[in-house]
Amino acid sequence: MSLLAEKNTPTVAVQRRGFSEFALRLRVSGVLAFLFLVGLIFSLLTPQFFTVQNATAIASNAAILSIVAAAQAIVLLTRNVDVSVGSMMGFTAYLTADYASRHPNVGAELVLLALVIGLGLGMINGLLVAYGRVSSLIATLATMSLYRGFTYMYAHGQEVTSNKLPKWMLHSVDLRVWGIPALVIVCIFVVVLVAIFLRHYPIGRRIYAVGSNPLATVFYGLRIQRVVLLAYGLSGLLCGFAGLLYAARVGTVTVILASGWEMSSLAAAVIGGVSVTGGSGTVIGAALGALVLATIDNGLVLLGIPEFWRMFIQGSSIVAAAAVDVFIGARIRKSLQGQRFGRRAA
Amino acid sequence: MKGRWAWKPSQWEMMLAILTVAAGAWSAQLSPYYLNLDQIADSTRQFIFPGLLALGLMVVVVLGEIDISLASTLAVGTVLFSKFSECHVQVWIALPIVIGICGLLGALNGLLVAGLRLPSLAVTLGTMGAYRGLAFIIGSERGYTDFDDSYLWVGSERVLGDILPISFILFAIASLAVGFVMHYTVFGRRCFAVGRNNDAAWFSGIKVRTIKIRAYTLAGALAAFAALVWVGQYGSARGDNADGAILFVVTAVVLGGVDINGGKGTVLGVVLALFLLGTIRNGMGLANIAGPIQTVVLGGLLTVGVLLPALSASTSHFLHLLLPRRSTPK
Amino acid sequence: MSESASSLTALRVAGVSKTYGVSRALADVSFDILRGRVHALLGENGAGKSTLVKIITGIVEADSGQIFVGSKAVHFRTPIEARIAGIAAVYQDPKLFAHLDVAENIFMGAYPTTLAGTVDRKTMYERAESALRQLGLALDPRSLIAGLSVAELQFVEIARALVADLQLLILDEPTSALTPAESGRLFKIIRTLRDKGKSVLLITHRLEEVEEIADDITVLRDGRHVATRPASEINRTALVQMMVGRPIETLFARRQSAGLGKEILRVEKLGLLGKFAEVSFSLRAGEIVGMAGLVGAGRSEIAQSLFGIRPPSTGRVYLNGRRVIPRDPNQMLRLGLAYLPEDRDSQGLILPESIVDNVTLPIVGRLARFGVLNRASERQIATSAIATYDVKATSVDQPVSSLSGGNRQKVAFAKWLATKPTALILDEPTHGIDIGSKAQVHRITIDLADSGLGVLLISSDLPELLAISDRILVIAEGRLVSEFSREEATQEKVMMAATQDVRGLAQ
């Protein structure tokens, strides 16, 4: 019987190894496949879809969302969530736009301002969740309204119209390099930067570890609190930058700018394969998820379908992605526990 | 939950009551319009429909889960009512149907959370969007305002010398009902047990999956009532109804002393918290404090509400640091 | 400590004690682990082995005593500190990150970095590969952890220990999930480490493995150090004697079994993939059947499977003569089977709730009128329960957390018995409670059996089993290996059966 057990071992191990690895690696290719499929469907349904002009429009729309999706992805990796992303964007957008309108000679230090504001907002989230031990949903729900409220208070109901913003800011968004909008290039650059950070720097790897197995982190000397604080700080930083970009893009900054982006960023991230239970997923995937959402939006517009189907699609995709993710996660957990007597006691 | 039928309001609840009175005093001092029975009665409308949602949310939270899709379910309810009104269906026929559908939406949440074991955060974040989208799809972009009078009755009419809103009576009945269920019935006892200790409850023979589905369904059904109140109160139905109201609802539940991790809380606490929040909101309105600032205050209250247990924990943590170290149990 | 002595000693345990509440996990344990030796640590369940390891690796703190590494006194507060000092432990449940690959798991927390501060993947994979090759593993360091077999997971953990500057490797029951071939490979690694001058502390119950590979053996019993000897000086019989040898306490009532009734529970070829298989036994009214075995042998799994917590994959269960398919605890409770969980505080009771709420939780439905709670009945039942079981409490409204372990256990008993079961499974009912309550629990158990219940008693306390069981079943590694009647059972026989190697067993 022990001989039989020996013979069985390789096949069982390979099978299990095969599926879990396959499933994890499937995620990114899955998004690409989904993107391709969606693109194909829309191309067939309307001739206006498959043009360079349209593709550029889609990319521009996806660009800023991809940064916010990346921000959300970082937080999701640690097994937390951040629903204050829209408010952080709005707050930063308003403050920087207002500042720019009052100091017309401002230059690139505006970017620095946006980053600092975003970082600060993100750190508050991080402090609440990591050190205040507040559940991440509740904490960011609270800050979501706090930050939005602060925006209102600061604005006194005024909006910052585009004629008040520095020209370079507004024009920079329209710039094109070899036909590709500068906005898209900047966003790709940022996302790639974040991706490199997460993949190649030890701190980035720790973010994955914390979400993958928070209980084991004590055995590796990882301090969960610091990692979570960092994740939220990064999220705020990215959202701050995204807010500035958004202000430049729309020109007129209102107080409700970017409301609802929390849903979109979450949808983009989970569609892009980021797990809601932490530990797995990539910002590239999240960016691709943003592209998918933008494509769907674009297609719906071209087909004349009302915009609010988008909300329905976004919400349903979050649930569907969560289901897929839990399924995969269960298989992974099972394989990690292994089977004690499986081969003998069969 | 001591003694036979008697209870003693807890410290937290008494504090809420005191704070409400204080908020009332502050409001009265702010504005001469406050201390008017008519005004106060009318102001309760501020928290009736969120209150109904909060009652449902409380049950779910006691079980250790969360549901942030309730405001979206309410929107589905209002647009459904508008459709029925358009077809000139009597509200008494429409109501049970809408309750059924909203309950089904809740049950779907429950199935995903308890049946498929998906994290309730992700599920209700998703259904929050999906149901909101559904509300838009069912309703029209413009919104419906042409309601039959029968639909408006609950949300707008008043009795007892034209002072007491009917919706308040509805809320009172709902509170008593949910309070009774949570604190005096088998279902309620089991909810608390599951929220306190999921494993031990299951080992004791409680069907955890079933009870969670039931709780989510109840929350959905209550949202239908909230939708009816909304329709009467605002006279309109559109996909974006109550968008963002979930913050108020969650704040009311947290401030009401319900532990976000489950197993602890009272309906009385939630009701008192609703009164407190309503009074603060009313006072702020009278003081002409802008809506957005009110939102900030709300967010701040929520933050304080959740931080309190952590604050008290860290204070005792500090004390432990000063005392000689104790070993960690196995 | 003299220079020559310290150069021979990798780790010295001196007078270590640890108490958890009423139970004494370790009492004044002292021994040395020498350099370049494989040191086996033996003992029954509850002897204190895992507590000692936790203290050595810095997971818990000792109440008193000292640990010396070489000649230096050390005090680790986290496992990382222990690891830096060269002490690493590998446990049965892997503490790895499923979403990362093998090399990253090995180097997490101590990545090799380039000048730019990035992770030097090339070096990382090379070093991981060499560490794995040292272990004789042809494992690709790039493969994800999710998908590896249990053996491979363990080897990854050992590789992780190797890349740090290892002095002492602690292995906690490493071969329990390995095939003979994999165990052989593990032993080769252990020998290689030893030959390199490292020390290995091996916690195991497999006496034949101890004979095969151990250089020194330490036996713990009831938290006390019994002996430390070179392996060459003792034989298996002596070892078992050291592990269990103690006078049987006359404190426990001896069971005079009354007549046995009809069969209440019959189990045929019960199996749960990965946990246990081919388990068959029966339980009659009035009988107390003991179930002995080592931790991890599968006893709790069998019981929980019967109770519907993790339904069995194969086999048949008959309760009161009728075939049942366990699905969930709710069903089994209604059919008359009750299970007192081993983990009393987190699975058996809801600690922050009151006595009355705990005791009546399974039966609230039965007592209620039209769904409304019947507080009066509940209090009545709770009050009579604390009187019957002599629970030291001032009122039934007291939270259970304020009671001592023994009293909590009695409340747990009251709770399950309130459901009026016909068969009762007790999982380590006297674990961690004081001697007085222990005796009371035994009395209660005997009375229950005498009144017609069938009791299945899972216990690691051999004297207890011998005192009150009518029969003793022995489970080893998921199989029912022996059955002893009360007359023929002795502690040694039971322990021998429990430590048997089942891998050679035919179907």
Image (cartoon, coloured by chain):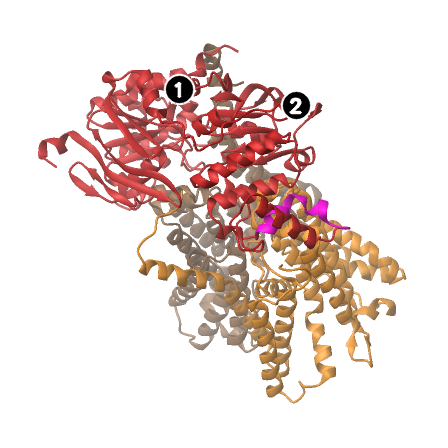
| Chain that the image shows in orange | B
Question: Which secondary structure dominates the residues rendered in magenta?
Answer: helix
Which residue in the rendered view is the most extreme toward the left?
A: C3
Residue that numbered label 1 is attached to: C492
Residue that numbered label 2 is attached to: C261
Q: Residues within 10 Å of mark 2 (few under 14, many from 20)?
A: some
| Chain that the image shows in red | C
Quick check: marks 1 and 2 in contact, CB under 8 Å?
no
Q: Nearer the viewer, residue B105 or C480?
A: C480
Q: Nearer the viewer, residue A64 or B216?
A: B216
Quarter of the figure with residue C208: top left
Q: What's the residue type where badge 2 is placed? A: Gly
The residues colored magenta run: C355-370
Q: Nearer the viewer, residue A14 or B186?
A: B186
Q: What's the residue type where badge 1 is placed? A: Glu
Residue B196: give x, y in percent of width and height: 57, 50
Q: Name which of mark 1 and mark 2 comes first in the sequence.
A: 2
Which residue is located at x 35 percent, y 24 percent?
C245
C463 sits to left or right of C157:
right
| The magenta stretch spans residue C368 | yes
Q: Chain of mark 2?
A: C
